[in-house]
Image (spheres, helix red, strand yellow):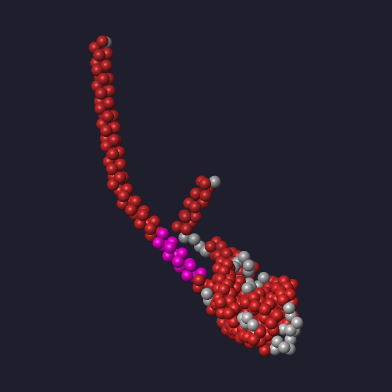
Amino acid sequence: GGGGGGDGAGLNDRLLDHDGQSSSRHLTRSHSLTDADAEAGAVSAEPLRADNTAVNESGEADRGGKSQASFLTMLKSVLGPREILIYLICVQFYIAVFIFIAVASKFLKDTFDGVDQVQAGLLTSLPYTVSAVVSPLLGFSMDKVGRSGIFVGLACLGLSAVHITFAFFSDYVQPTAVMVFLGLCYSTCAASLWPMIALVVESRNISTAYGLMMSIQNMGLALAPVFIMPMVPTSIEHQDQYRTIEVIFATLAFGGLICTFFLYLVDRKHGGVLFSGPEKDDLVGQPSPRINPLNPRVSPYLRQQMRFRANQEAQHRVMTPKTPQAIRQQYFRRLRIQSRV
């Protein structure tokens, strides 16, 4: 028994030594594999990092190219023939109004007998007073009537008549009536010209178009006094220079009328949106020339067409016979959805 116990103990010791050696060999092998994997990872990290850098650089280049292309597309959408003509009408019309009002006080006092400094100031404020009262009514009327381009042309024609009257017929008119008529022309143009941008420019670029239009207008208002103010006479002997100034203003207003005519010709090729009125079909959700067809939030007709097209596509997908591969993909898709739930 004692010998058997000694032999069993020796056998156990040999087994433990064998297990310890094998485990140590396994640990050594695992450590060596781990070190080899780490070295391989360290070796392959640089090419991978270089590839990622190249991918990021190419992605940034693609994004830069796309942003540049979108910027050029945006500029093209706000610098079409109709948009440019609208910008030209705006700058010419407002120079003939605002710069004239800047010199109107001295002009009225020097030209009309019995008009002193106080009366000249009151006459100068008449266009703005008339505009404050009449503009909401004109805006409401144009929403009902439409035909913005026609009203812009009439405003330019009326403004040209105002300056021609002051230039050649100042002895036969009352300055109060002419300044009130100037206020009506100013209000008519403001109520009809600015909404035209929303009819010809995509809804996503309207703010850009308005900003560009305001920039061109202010650029003209900044440059015009440089040429007009030195022509204002400083003495009674040179009052004929007022006629030259009024002729310049009349020419600018008439230039706006010419641009309106060309705008009519160009707009005819685009369906006559700017010179047509609202149609009766607007009440039943049909497309209107005064609605931007590219904006689904504005056009109920476009929303209806999009819903109808989506329903047709859904019915087509249901009725179309499916291949075994499509049925298998649909089955696995449902399994994934159920597993998520």
The image quarter containing residue 268 is: bottom right
Q: Which residue range is magenta in the image?
A: 60-74
Please, is residue 305 above or below residue 329 in the view? below
Q: Nearer the viewer, residue 288 or 104?
A: 104
* 61 vs 34, nearest the viewer: 61
Count how many numbered circles sit on residues in the image: 0
- Image quarter (top left, top right, bottom left or bottom right) of the N terminus: top left
Q: Main secondary structure of the magenta part?
A: helix
Residue depicted at 55% across the width and 65% down the height: 313
61 in magenta: yes
Foreground of the two, 316 or 76: 76
User: In the image, 289: left or right of 341?
Assistant: right
Residue 28, compared with residue 13, is above or below; it is: below
In the rendered image, residue 45, in percent from the top left (x then y), is placed at 32, 48
Residue pushed farthest top? 2
Report x, y in % for residue 115: 74, 80
> Can residue 165 be seen from the camera position used here?
yes
Residue 141 visible in image: no
In-image side of 216 versus 44 (left or right): right
Q: Residue 51, how many percent across, how many down? A: 34, 54
- Picture quarter containing residue 295? bottom right
Q: Position of residue 74 (x, y in %)?
A: 51, 69
Quick check: is 11 in the magenta stretch? no
What's the residue at 24%, 16% (across, down)?
A: 7
Rendered residue at 38%/60% (across/down): 58
